[in-house]
Each structure stands twice: as structure tokens, then as C-alpha cells.
């Protein structure tokens, strides 16, 4: 009798036992695997040897160059815009000047005078020429002295102020001969010359602003054309305000419609001691 027959028949595991055995075997395999590892798995880190920097020196220099170009272009556009605005202002002033010139030409256009017919048998006799009586120049340090109805001179310490009044809406600068002589002498000697154009307007408005500007511009043109350096001339103008006298009367308004020329930083002794016998020609 063999051993197998003596021990009895072999046991065959059922399905449940087979599943249990498989789970046990898998657990043992995983435990063995984990036991063989020295620690947790390491995450792979890139070395960075092939990395390309975003802000390289070349890119930074290129950015600086493009930024400088954009800034230069912006400044150029700003300068051009300012030039355009300045040209527009000059054009507007020129238009106003032409309008005023046209108004003055229409106002001052001479009218035809009738020619007197000589009597029969008698030759026409020419009327004797008459000349206006000369006014007297009296310059004082105390207050402005009127040379005539439209001109005055005032000495202020080391400065002399010349005032020339204008008719309504007029801008031509036409001082008398004596005023021209004293004005040019002071303007050439002074270190600084200020020109102030004024009107008799009670409120600021574009028309009177242009009139005040033209009065100052024409006075400056007169000085420059007579040898006064433009570099030492400073010009301002006001459409309203800066009145010399009370502006509520017609007489005051006629004085306030003026241009003032102040020669500064000069020896005023010659003006303060001017002889009262100095004559002034008639104004135009």
C-alpha cells in the first residue's frame, strides 16, 4: 500500500480560497518591493542647462532702444503740435490785423473836396499856410506830463514811461516828432524795454484783445525799425484792466486806449531836468 493511498485523497481549494491566496501573495510582493526601496521615490528635476532666458541682455538693449525711439517720436509730435498751435495763433492775429487795417482804410479814406472856381477876371489867391502851435515838453518825476492830448511822459526813478493814446479801435503807432526823439533815446539807453498794449474795454473779449495786441506789436515794430534791439523788448497786452485813469468817463476812456513804453535801468537825469522850452510837434 503506497503513502498516497494511506493519506487519503488530495484537497482541491475552492474559488474563495484561491482568491484569498492571490491577495496574500500580492500583499507579500508589494511588501517586499517597498522593503527593498531606501526611501520615497524622488521627483525628476530638470537641470536647466538648456534653458533660454527671457530677459537676455540683447532683449533688454532692444527694449531700451525701442523705448528711446518712442519717446523721441512723442517729443517730436508734441513739438509739432505746439508749432501748429503757435502758427494758428499767429494766423488768427494776422486775420484780425487785416480786418482792422481794412476798417481803418475805410474810415480814413479821404473824401473828394470841391475845387473852388476862381472869379472871372481875378486870379485865385492861395490861402496862407498855417502850422499848429507847438506844445511844450515838461518832464517831471512827480506825475505824468501831457505833451498834448494823446501823449505823456513820466519819470519813475531809473525808468521813463511814455504813453501814446489811440482813437477808438485804432492801432497805428504815430507819436509826435518830439516824442519819437525822447522815446528812442530812452529805449536805446535802457537795459530793458516793456511795451504794454491796453484798451478801454470793461470786459475781456477777443476783439479788444486783438486791438491791444496790435497796439503793442506796432509800437515794438517802430522801436525795432529804429535800432532798438529786439532782445531787450518785452511785450504784454490786456483787453480789459490796467487803466491809467478812471474809465467811467469818455475822457478817461480816451486816455486808457493807449500803449505804454517803459524804458528801464537808465540815467533819467536828462529826462527829469528837460527844459520847459523844448517843443513838441503836432500828433498825427
Image (cartoon, grey):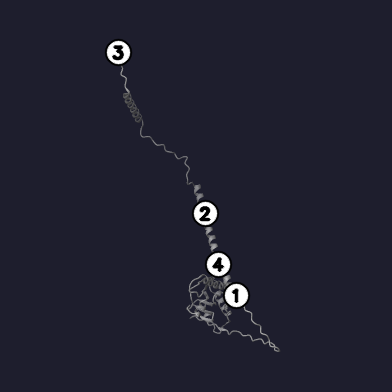
Crowding at label 2, few (<14), some or many (≥20) Cα neighbours within 10 Å?
few
Counting residues from the start of the chain, the first of labels 2 and 4 encountered is 2
Q: Which of 116 and 231 is in front in this view?
A: 116
Residue drawn at point x = 53 percent, y = 58 percent? 77
Counting residues from the start of the chain, the first of labels 2 and 1 encountered is 2
Residue hosting label 3: 5
Crowding at label 1, few (<14), some or many (≥20) Cα neighbours within 10 Å?
few
**Marks 3 and 4, how far apart in space?**
134 Å
x and y percentages locating residue 128 in the rendered image: 64, 86
Residue hosting label 2: 70
Residue hosting label 4: 92
Rendered image quadrant of residue 123:
bottom right
x and y percentages locating residue 180 in the rendered image: 57, 77
Q: Do the residues labelled 1 and 3 touch (CB within 8 Å)?
A: no
Of circles 1 and 4, the one toward us is: 1
x and y percentages locating residue 268 in the rendered image: 52, 78
**Marks 2 and 3, how far apart in space?**
105 Å
Counting residues from the start of the chain, the first of labels 2 and 3 encountered is 3
Element under disc 1: helix
Of circles 2 and 4, the one toward us is: 4
x and y percentages locating residue 94 in the rendered image: 57, 68
Amino acid at each position: 500500500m503506497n503513502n498516497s493511498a494511506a493519506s487519503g485523497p488530495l484537497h482541491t481549494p475552492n474559488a474563495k480560497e484561491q482568491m484569498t491566496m492571490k491577495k496574500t501573495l500580492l500583499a507579500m510582493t508589494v511588501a517586499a518591493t517597498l522593503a527593498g526601496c531606501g526611501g520615497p521615490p524622488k521627483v525628476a528635476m530638470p537641470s536647466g542647462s538648456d534653458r533660454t532666458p527671457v530677459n537676455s541682455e540683447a532683449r533688454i538693449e532692444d527694449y531700451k532702444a525701442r523705448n528711446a525711439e518712442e519717446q523721441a517720436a512723442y517729443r517730436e509730435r508734441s513739438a509739432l503740435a505746439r508749432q501748429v498751435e503757435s502758427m494758428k495763433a499767429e494766423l488768427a492775429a494776422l486775420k484780425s490785423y487785416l480786418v482792422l487795417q481794412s476798417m481803418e482804410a475805410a474810415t480814413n479814406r479821404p473824401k473828394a473836396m470841391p475845387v473852388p472856381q476862381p472869379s472871372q477876371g481875378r486870379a485865385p489867391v492861395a490861402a496862407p499856410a498855417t502850422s499848429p502851435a507847438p506844445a511844450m515838453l515838461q518832464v517831471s518825476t512827480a506825475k505824468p506830463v501831457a505833451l498834448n492830448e494823446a501823449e505823456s511822459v513820466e519819470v519813475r526813478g531809473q525808468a521813463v514811461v511814455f504813453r501814446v493814446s489811440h482813437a477808438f479801435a485804432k492801432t497805428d503807432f504815430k507819436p509826435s516828432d518830439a516824442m519819437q526823439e525822447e522815446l528812442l533815446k530812452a529805449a536805446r539807453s535802457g537795459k530793458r524795454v516793456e511795451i504794454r498794449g491796453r484798451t478801454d474795454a470793461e470786459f475781456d473779449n477777443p476783439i479788444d484783445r486783438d486791438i491791444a495786441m496790435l497796439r503793442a506789436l506796432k509800437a515794438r515794430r517802430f522801436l525795432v525799425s529804429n535800432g532798438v534791439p529786439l532782445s531787450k523788448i518785452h511785450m504784454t497786452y490786456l483787453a480789459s484792466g490796467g487803466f491809467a485813469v478812471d474809465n467811467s468817463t469818455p475822457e478817461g476812456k480816451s486816455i486808457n486806449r493807449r500803449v505804454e513804453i517803459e524804458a528801464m535801468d537808465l540815467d533819467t537825469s536828462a529826462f527829469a531836468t528837460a527844459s520847459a522850452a523844448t517843443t513838441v510837434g503836432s500828433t498825427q
